[in-house]
RNA sequence: GGCGGGAUAGCUCAGAUGGUUAGAGCGCAGGAUUCAUAACCCUGAGGUCACGGGUUCAACUCCCGUUUCCGCUACCA
């Protein structure tokens, strides 16, 4: 039941301003949204395209700390880079704003305040780590300490970037503040929780029942999964000084949770774009709201934000959330920290004036239904065979032949000699238009783009069938066949004009180049002109043909592959993924030496009590992939130790084995089992784990020093 | 481990509501052609639709297992 919408509001996920954008971002979100919007604009529909930088949150403050600059400096830098990359790629936002703007502060605060005043939050107190020196609570990321897993002394409270372990602050050994280096104390702090569980009924009805056949399976499935497993209240505030201050009494030092304020950024940006009238787009039922995002954002856009909008009241809910899957590169996942990515700002430098090629390749192979793979070989193949050989070649053939046989002017169409194949092709043009429309309305961008190329292909076939170059081989033949030649080229040129209209949402730069050659104004690109056979006036002189695309040579894509591999190799060799992620430009700086820990005194070492132990029994821990529950004989006592080695050893093969045990490690519960100690393991670069064992059998409990 | 989404020609991917010979592009093998960036056009070869069961007159398409990839989540040397 397609509603009769009066206007369309399109949002693209706010990119996080702590790094540049790469082709995965483009393919998953910004390109499809731009195609959709350009199409709707060409349809003369009332559409607004909203985006901006997401500039709050802990990772930005961390990056600022690491680079020795302020968070504002970080976001200023990346906001500029990101904004420029989008502009260069022709992503045509009506506004690209940022969540550090004043309008956004006001908007998100008002949003929060309204919910607060309506009593929609729950206040809760909990114990959090507090830095007495800086007089502030610390987010998980601000807490550093020794990783219980790999011993990295600079692990963060949520993750150890050295070994990739996900942590909680409580797990860190001797936690300290990342800001002041001071030891931490625990203090009570108050936060405001949004009881998502109160909206389960509404969400179930709206999504599970209402969107079953409308939303993509991946989106629908993900939502259903969340709803079925039950929703929990979620904290909507954080202790931090970077973000939107919580606008109520007694909330000093607290800001809105970045996932609370970020989606409101769509609203603020709309406000900024249209100080008068923004609310028409957000508050009237006949607005079609569409969120374009990557699959990692589904829960926020389909569950949390709609629940917020519903709770606040007065806002429209998204009609659709066409989330794409992920794009891999050369068979591997995109990884910022491993620098396995194709960055947009680098692409536009390496391939000037080839924005449409990237747009084409990313759309033709967009991860619409599953993760897809981007390879440079595929990039080259698609460009050379589809854009150059089919599309560009057809346009060029039509132009060249027209100049050769029709004196550089659009020939007239002679009804008296028209043939069935002429009419057939004309019908195909209209047919193609309809197919593209229906595909685009249903977010099937690759299908739509395929139809464009397919139509060019039909043009090529038509030219081949009529073969005007044969009809005009000699002056005698030319005179005899001029009418047939005229008709053929008349149709080919009108088709070329139609191709410009049809490719415009996908290949806007190319569409304009075609307009230039045909000496027509951009206005011709209006969608309603699609299918017309009188776009070019008979007798009108056209410009000399210029190639729309150059070929991509083997060396170019080889160089790109080599660049990708080389950077990844450097990062790998450096064993310093973090440094590379923080400075993707600074690949040359990466050093091959592994990160070394600082010197420690004997007294530090002496704090650790190590003993040889003998494994008495081992069993797999239920509901955990990697955990084994071990009974270890330490001579004077037997202990239960839970160890994450199940992927490397089976329970049977390790019984009786002697191992090294950290005896005085604070006990910790895992999967409900208290683990008293830790088994030492050695790990190689591939992640393989082996025991660190006494070289000969020795009495259980022997001290290791 | 829980949940969700994938697994289809050599490669990259499409395949509403189950129904005649399962599709496209590239690649490959032939052919035709020369207007065009040696491009275009035609023909052909290539798939037990991951595996095993089941429902059905009929399953790539529905159901149940298994294997495997991706994501979220839990957990982790």
Image: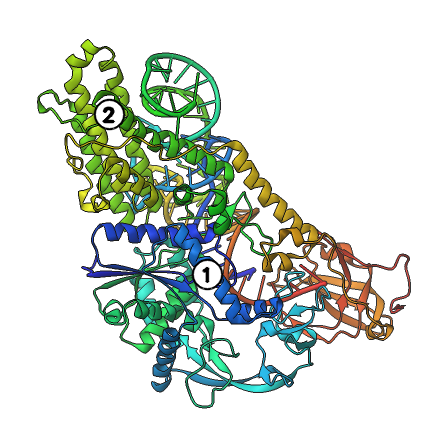
**Same subunit under labels 1 and 2?**
yes
Which one is in front, A370 or B48? A370
Q: In which quarter of the image is the C terminus of chain A?
A: bottom right
- Residue B16 left/right relative to A263: left
Which one is in front, A508 or A521? A521
Identify the residue at horizontal 16%, vertical 13% (top origin).
A479
Can you identify the residue that label 2 sits on? A402
Question: What is the CA distance from the residue labelled 1 to the residue labelled 2?
Answer: 46 Å
Q: In which quarter of the image is the N terminus of chain A?
A: bottom left
| Residue A151 visible, this angle | yes
> What chain does mark 1 sit on?
A
Q: What element carries label 1?
A: helix
Q: In this view, does A680 lie above or below A537?
A: below
> What chain does mark 2 sit on?
A
- Residue A602 left/right relative to A686: right
Q: Where is residue A233 in the image (x, y as percent from the top left)?
A: 45, 77
Identify the residue at horizontal 15%, vertical 30% (top origin).
A539
Q: Quadrant of residue A212?
A: bottom left
Q: Total number of numbered labels?
A: 2
Q: Is mark 2 on a helix, strand or loop?
A: helix
Disc assigned to residue A80 = 1
- Residue B22 left/right relative to A229: left
Q: Residue furthest left?
A: A416
């Amino acid at each position: 039941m397609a509603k009769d919408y009066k206007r369309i509001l399109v949002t693209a996920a706010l990119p996080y301003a702590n790094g540049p954008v790469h082709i995965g971002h483009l393919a998953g979100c910004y390109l499809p949204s731009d195609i959709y919007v350009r199409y709707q604009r060409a349809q003369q529909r009332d559409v607004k395209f909203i985006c901006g930088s997401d500039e709050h949150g802990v990772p930005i403050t961390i990056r600022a700390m690491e680079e020795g600059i302020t968070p504002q400096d970080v976001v200023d830098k990346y906001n500029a880079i990101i904004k420029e990359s989008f502009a260069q790629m022709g992503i045509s936002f009506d506004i690209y704003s940022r969540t550090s703007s004043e309008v956004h502060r006001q908007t998100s605060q008002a949003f929060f305040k309204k919910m607060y005043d309506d009593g929609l939050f729950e206040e809760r107190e909990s114990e959090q780590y507090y830095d007495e020196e800086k007089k502030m609570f610390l987010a998980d990321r601000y807490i550093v300490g020794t990783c219980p897993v790999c011993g990295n002394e600079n692990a963060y409270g949520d993750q150890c970037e050295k070994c990739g372990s996900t942590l909680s602050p409580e797990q860190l050994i001797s936690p300290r503040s990342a800001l002041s280096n001071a030891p931490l104390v625990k203090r009570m702090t108050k936060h405001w929780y949004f009881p998502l569980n109160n909206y389960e009924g509404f969400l179930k009805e709206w999504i599970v029942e209402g969107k079953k056949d409308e939303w993509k399976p991946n989106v629908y499935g993900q939502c259903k999964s969340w709803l079925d497993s039950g929703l929990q209240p979620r904290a909507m505030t954080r202790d931090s000084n970077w973000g939107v201050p919580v606008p109520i009494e007694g909330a000093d030092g607290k800001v809105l949770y970045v996932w609370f304020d970020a989606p409101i950024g769509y609203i603020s940006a709309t406000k900024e774009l249209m100080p008068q009238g923004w609310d028409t787009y957000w508050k009237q039922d006949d607005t079609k709201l569409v969120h374009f995002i990557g699959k990692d954002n589904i829960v926020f856009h389909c569950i949390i934000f709609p629940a917020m909008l519903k709770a606040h009241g007065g806002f429209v809910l998204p009609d659709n959330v066409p989330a794409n899957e992920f794009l891999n590169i050369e068979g591997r996942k995109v990884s910022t920290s491993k620098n396995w990515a194709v960055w947009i700002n680098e692409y536009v430098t390496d391939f000037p004036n080839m924005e449409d090629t990237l747009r084409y390749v990313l759309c033709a192979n967009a991860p619409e239904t599953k993760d897809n793979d981007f390879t440079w070989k595929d990039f080259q193949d698609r460009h050379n065979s589809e854009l150059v050989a089919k599309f560009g070649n057809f346009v060029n053939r039509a132009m060249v032949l027209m100049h050769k046989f029709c004196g550089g002017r659009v020939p007239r169409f002679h009804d008296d000699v028209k043939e069935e194949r002429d009419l057939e092709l004309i019908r195909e043009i209209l047919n193609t238009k309809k197919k593209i429309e229906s595909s685009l309305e249903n977010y099937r961008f690759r299908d739509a783009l395929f139809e464009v190329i397919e139509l060019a292909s039909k043009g090529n076939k038509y030219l081949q069938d009529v073969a005007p170059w044969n009809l005009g081989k000699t002056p005698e033949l030319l005179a005899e066949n001029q009418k047939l030649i005229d008709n053929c080229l008349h149709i080919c040129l009108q088709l070329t004009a139609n191709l410009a209209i049809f490719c415009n949402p996908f290949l806007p730069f190319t569409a304009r180049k075609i307009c230039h050659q045909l000496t027509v104004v951009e206005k011709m690109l209006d969608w309603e002109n699609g299918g017309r056979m009188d776009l070019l006036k008979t007798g009108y002189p056209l410009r000399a043909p210029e190639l729309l695309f150059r070929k991509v040579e083997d060396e170019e894509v080889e160089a790109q592959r080599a660049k990708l591999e080389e950077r990844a190799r450097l990062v790998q060799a450096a064993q310093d993924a973090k440094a590379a992620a923080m400075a993707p430009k600074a690949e040359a700086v990466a050093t091959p030496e592994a990160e070394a820990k600082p010197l420690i005194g004997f007294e530090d070492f002496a704090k650790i009590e190590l003993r040889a132990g003998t494994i008495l029994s081992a069993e797999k821990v239920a509901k955990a992939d990697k955990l084994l529950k071990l009974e270890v004989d330490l001579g004077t006592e037997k202990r239960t130790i839970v160890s994450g080695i199940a992927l490397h050893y089976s329970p049977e093969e390790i019984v009786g084995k002697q191992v090294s045990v950290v005896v005085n490690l604070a006990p910790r519960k895992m999967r409900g089992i208290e683990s008293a100690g830790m088994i030492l393991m050695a790990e190689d670069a591939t992640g393989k784990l082996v025991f660190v064992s006494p070289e000969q059998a020795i009495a259980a409990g022997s001290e290791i020093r």
